[in-house]
Image: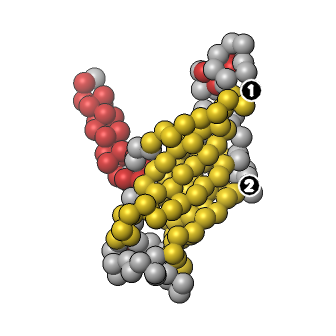
Amino acid sequence: MFFPKRVAFTSLIAMFALLPPALLAQDAHIGSVRTEFKLLGPNNTIEVERFDDPDVQGISCYLSYSQIGGITGAVGLAEEASEASVACRQTGEIIFDLAEVEEQEVIFTQRRSALFKNMRVVRMHDAETQTFVYLTYSTKLVDGSPKNAITAVNYGAVGGNQ
């Protein structure tokens, strides 16, 4: 009986090791504002977080999204809204290896419900204008949401490493 448990544990570790680093990246909580008072459990809020682009040094992205409070929010069973906003800015010298930056790649993901809903940020590379475009949207197992937000950072003026 010991062997199958060990294999399952090893498989779990291997699965996490294969995840892209961006999906495991830590984000920084910047702040929040209360949007609705809840008598039981936490209040409804709008959260603001920052994460740094994992492959492009010098670009940070700021996300805002709603967080449902109350009892369902406290225990993680609330279905969070699909609305989110993203703003990415140059926060230092922009440095990247063009060979390591894909044309389109998911660089951030966050679980938004107990059952198969995620908020994602995708970085797209517009080589012609030397710009990184960041798109946020939500996915769901059956149907996602067309609600999205977009921002862009031009690196041509600062001369990213290519």
Is residue 100 depicted above or below 157 in this figure?
above
Image quarter (top left, top right, bottom left or bottom right) of the N terminus: top left
Query: Pointer 2: residues within 10 angstroms few (<14), some, or many (20+)?
Result: few
Q: Is residue 152 above or below residue 120?
A: below
Q: Which mark is residue 147?
A: 2
Front label number (2 vs 1): 1
Residue at the image position 64 percent from the left and 16 percent from the top: 41
- Does residue 74 appear anywhere in the picture? yes
Which residue position is annotated with label 1?
36
- Looking at the picture, which amino acid does disc 1 mark? Glu
Residue depicted at 35% across the width and 71% down the height: 96
x and y percent of residue 68 in the render?
Answer: 68, 30
* Left or right relative to 6: residue 162: right
Disc 1 crowd, CA 10 A, few/some/many (<14, 14-19, 20+) = some
Q: Quadrant of the C terminus?
A: bottom left
- Rendered view: 54 above or below 110: below
Q: Secondary structure at mark 1?
A: strand
Quarter of image, res 95: bottom left
Specify the farthest residue to the top: 40
* Closer to the camera in the image, 78 or 36: 36
Q: Position of residue 61 (x, y in %)?
A: 51, 56
Foreground of the two, 148 or 36? 36
Q: Nearer the viewer, residue 8 or 99?
A: 99
- Image point 39% across, 80% down: which residue? 159
Query: What amino acid type is highlighted by mark number 2?
Result: Lys
Q: Residue at x 67, y 29 (%)?
A: 34
* Gap in angstroms between the C-alphas marked 2 and 1: 22 Å
- Residue 146 percent across, percent down from the top left: 74, 57
Taking the view exactly as shown, the residue that stands out farthest to the bottom is 128
Badge 2 or badge 1: first in the primary sequence: 1
